[in-house]
Amino acid sequence: MIESWLLDTGPMVAYLLARDPAHARTSSVIDTFRGQFITTTAVITEVMYFVRRAPDGPDRLIGLLHATQTQVVDLSELRALDVCARLMRRYFDTPMDFADATLVWAAETLGVFDICTLDRRGFSIFRPTSGKRFRLVLP
């Protein structure tokens, strides 16, 4: 069975922007991982926003997604959006944004709880409805 990791906004932005303080750390992890990355369209939207002004930023993001064969999960069902809104209310004080909520939803839906994220605080607290903890894979 192929190992799967959820991929959050922070590591992708850090990977794509060499000036990011987490660039070296995230690059080594992303470059050496041989499993399946999974992310959501909401995360891709956030990354696009952060890399939009970098030379070829959006193109480099798409290149990264192709090179890593990242599975991009689209949330279009109202039931999934309801779950995300409920999660955002539940973790309002942490806080949880929509992209975070979609990753928690994806974890529950796909049964993948390993996550590549820089948001150690949030994903140490966030739980899907099963109550299962995330395993943070970045050192």
Image (cartoon, grey):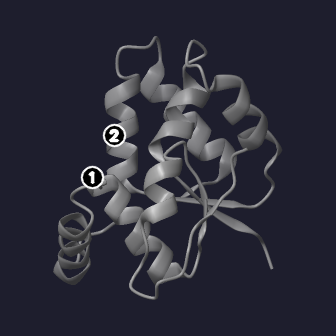
Instruction: From the viewer's side, name the closer residue of 115 and 39.
Output: 115
**Mark 1 packing: few (<14 Cα in 10 Å), some, or many (20+)?**
some
Q: Secondary structure at mark 2?
A: helix
Instruction: Give the quadrant of the C terminus.
Output: top right
**Mark 2 packing: few (<14 Cα in 10 Å), some, or many (20+)?**
some
Residue 3 % position (x, y): 75, 69
The residue that mark 1 highlights is 97
Residue at the image point whose x is 20% and y is 74% from the top: 86
The residue that mark 2 highlights is 46
The answer for how far apart the CA atoms under marks 1 and 2 are is 10 Å
- On the question of residue 72 being in view, the answer is no
Residue at the image point whose x is 76% and y is 61% from the top: 35
Look at the picture and state if 5 lies above or below 62: below
Left or right: where does residue 84 sit relative to residue 63? left
Look at the picture and state if 137 lies above or below 50: below
State the mark number for residue 81.
none
Quarter of the view holding residue 12: top right
| Amino acid type for the residue under numbered disc 1 | Asp
Instruction: Give the quadrant of the N terminus.
Output: bottom right
Are the two marked residues, 1 and 2, in contact with CB atoms closer than 8 angstroms?
A: yes
